[in-house]
Structure formats: C-alpha cells, structure tokens
Amino acid sequence: MSIIIDAGGLSCPQPVLMTLDKIKEIQKGEITVKVDTDTSKENVSRAVQSQGWEVADIKEDREGYQLTIRKN
Amino acid sequence: MKKNIFATRWGIIGVGAFIGVLAALLQRLGNPGNMGICVACFERDIAGALGLHRAGVVQYMRPEIIGFVLGSLIAAYLFNEFRPRMGSAPIVRFVLGVFAMIGALVFLGCPWRAILRLAGGDGNAIFGLLGLIGGIWIGTLFLKGGYNLGRVQKTYTSAGWLLPLIMAGFLILMLIFPQIKGEAKSGILFYSVKGPGVMHAPLIISLLVGLAIGFAAQRSRFCTMGAFRDLILFKHAHLFFGIISLVVSAFVVNLILGQFHPGFVKQPVAHTMQIWNFGGMVLAGLAFALAGGCPGRQLFLAGEGDGDSAVFVMGMIVGAGFAHNFGLASSPKGVGPHGVAAVIIGLIVCLFIGFTMRKKVI
C-alpha cells in the first residue's frame, strides 16, 4: 500500500500544505510526493524533516521529482 | 542528490545580507532615499519610461528590474532549473498584480522597500510592515480554506523566454535612447528631469547588481511574502531569516554611510498617513499571498520560465499606469485623491478571488 500525493504543477505552499495534511492524518508510514520544481522539492523536504519524517529517496523524472518520505 | 548551498539556513541569511548591503550601496550611488531597491517603485518607473503613465517625476527604465529577471534566467539555466510553465489562472494573476501595485503605491513601496525604509530609520514603514503581515495573514486563511489557482502546464521553452526577452528589449531601448541630461524624452523613452525618477545609480552598476541579486535570489528562493506566510502557516522561519538578515545588514551599512535618519516626518518618498500606510500594504500583502510571491519573487520565477509570474509582473506594470493616471498613488503629501477608494475596491476584489477560487485538487 503506498500513498501518493500528486502536487505536480502546483506552486508553493500547496505541495507543503498537502503533504503536511497527509502526515497529520496518518502519523507514520511512507508517502510518495510528486512535485515539478526544485523549490517545491526543497520546501517539502524541509517541511517533513521539521515534522520528524525522513526523506528516504528522491527520484528525478521527466515530470519533476518523486520524493519518498518515511516515518517509522 | 546535489546540494543547493543557497537553500540552506546560512544560504538564505547570506543572500539577505547580500541584498541589504547592495541596496544600501545603490542608494549611496544615486538611487532615491531608502529606495536602493524597490520592485514596485522600479516597475512603476518602468511604466513611466514607457509612457504608460505620465507622472513626470517617476520615469526611468530601472536596470535593476531587468537584471533581476535575466540574473534569475542565467542561474536557472546554469543549474538546470529552467522549467517553462504556465496556465494557472493567468487573468487572476494579472488582476492581483494590478492591485498589488496599487496597494504598494498607496504605502509607497514593496515589501523590500518597507524593510529598507525601516533599516533607514523611517518609522512609517512599521505601519506598512504591519499591514503587509495582516494582508498575508488573511491570505493564509484562504490557503487553509482550500484556495488555489490550479495547476500549471509545461509549455514551450520560447514561451518561458518571453518576459526575459521583453526585459532584454527594454535594456536595448535604453541603450538606443539613453538619458539626455535635462531632457524629459529621449527617442521613444520618457525620463524624469526631477524627483525620484532622476535619482539613479549608473546604468552598468544597477544592471550588474540586478543580475547578481537575480542570480542569488533564484538559487535561494528569497521571498519576502513567503517569509511571513511560512512563519504564519507552518511556523517555518527559513525565509524569515533572509529578511531579518536583509534589514540588519542594510541598517549597518546605512549607519556606516550616514544614511540612517530615525523619525516619522520628512522621510524620503514617504507619507505619515498611517492608516493608509497600513491599509495599502494589507491590500498588497493579500494580493502577494494569493499570487504566491512577493514582487521580487515573481520576477525571479518569471526568469526561470514561470509564465504566470510573468503575467503578474505585467499586471504590476499596468497597475502602475492605473495608479498614476487615476490619482491612486500616494506622494510625500499623503494619499492620492482616489487612493482610499482604490484600496477598498482592491480588498473587495481580493476577497472575491479568495472566497470563490477554492477547490480540492487531489
């Protein structure tokens, strides 16, 4: 089971808002966040780390970035 | 994963200090008082240079603005971040740009200048900054309520180039029709012979400083609206460190250069009608928050290919035309004859946008 947040094409703060809402909802686990700009990638990474989550992986593709964030 | 040093805590602090020092130096080199850099004022001066308004004292094709866009473009290409994109409610962004400019010109400055005015000792800036924070706070309520302008789409590289090309065109016009001392017009461009529009650092210095700041700000994502928004919305102080650094560094350089003059009256390009210093910036802050960036940030985003930010910039330039043609902009004497009405209309328009443009995007 994997949770995917598609924030592609949305500018900040939307990707951060969507990610933080989901983090609050599930408390722990793994989420994949899709973003399309470097700014969003940095902002989402910074925001989840401040919530005690880790950025386990960042994949770059044609659409932008896929961040895998995790908290056990 | 490649590390972007500019996006670290010390990176944003460094960029804030860099901007603060350069702004204070630009003032020393000729820019108007407490206006080393003011994105709103300088775009207003560009509107004047083009004849979109005919306020004789504020007509100059400010090279700093041109440099901001082109510096950001260069940084975006060097670091593979140029992403041409557009299509997220452009007309809304245009309207927000118009009213952001009107609000800023009622106060007499964008958020950058509000900070620089504070660093120069202008107490009236406190009311403007409080208004800015108030406007951004209202914006965060809309964001929490689901406000957003929808997704962008990828577009042609050449589409992302349009605003940078317009800026390059402005620079070329300036070189073809250079300022002639004491003349109000050179070829097709308007120039000021008195007032803030005649006060400027040498062209090449303004351009180089603009390029350097555009480069650094693109890398660091420096944004004065985002600084307060993230603090209010997420309690994230990252961008806020940047503006603290800007105000401290500009203050120190102002002290060293003898440019610090504390007080409320007779401050350069400022008025003391505090309700409207506050009210103008509530409008501007709300418009920036709804559009997702301060006027500087919109220029940097436009430089990295964001066509919606480019539309916001054009909205601001056209808004400057409205502001001066309709008597909405303030002067050191106080608010313009129709400035108060314009702020109220602007707030109603922003609330209309905030309340009606919300949807869940998942």
Image (spheres, rainbow, N blue to C red):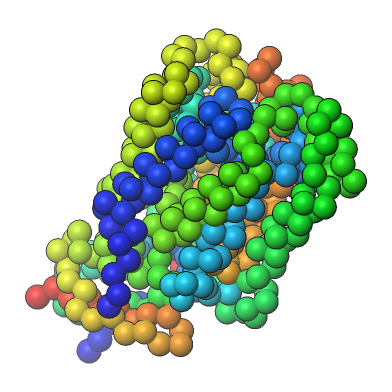
Residue at 65% across / 70% down in the picture?
Answer: B161
* Along the viewing direction, whichever of B294 and B362 lies nearer the viewer: B294
Decide: is B344 above or below B124. Answer: below
In this picture, residue B2 sits left or right of residue A52: right
In this picture, residue B178 sits left or right of residue B145: right
Which quadrant: the N terminus of chain B? bottom left
Q: Position of residue B14 (x, y in %)?
A: 33, 48
Q: Position of residue B61 (x, y in %)?
A: 72, 44
Decide: is B155 above or below B228. Answer: below
Query: Residue A65 is drawn in which quadrant?
Result: bottom left
Q: Position of residue B242 (x, y in %)?
A: 35, 45
Number of on-image labels: 0
* Along the viewing direction, whichever of B230 and B11 lies nearer the viewer: B11
Residue at 53% across / 47% down in the picture?
Answer: B209
Q: Is residue B282 visible to the viewer in this orientation of the structure? A: no
Residue that sits furthest to the left in the current view: A72
Q: Position of residue B126 (x, y in %)?
A: 44, 24
* Along the viewing direction, whichever of B293 and B348 lies nearer the viewer: B293
Decide: is B157 above or below B28. Answer: below
Q: Is residue B217 visible to the viewer in this orientation of the structure? A: yes
Residue at 19% across / 79% down in the picture?
Answer: A56
Residue at 25% across / 86% down in the picture?
Answer: A2
Residue that sits furthest to the right in the current view: B187
* Along the viewing direction, whichever of B68 and B132 lies nearer the viewer: B68
Which quadrant: the C terminus of chain B? bottom left
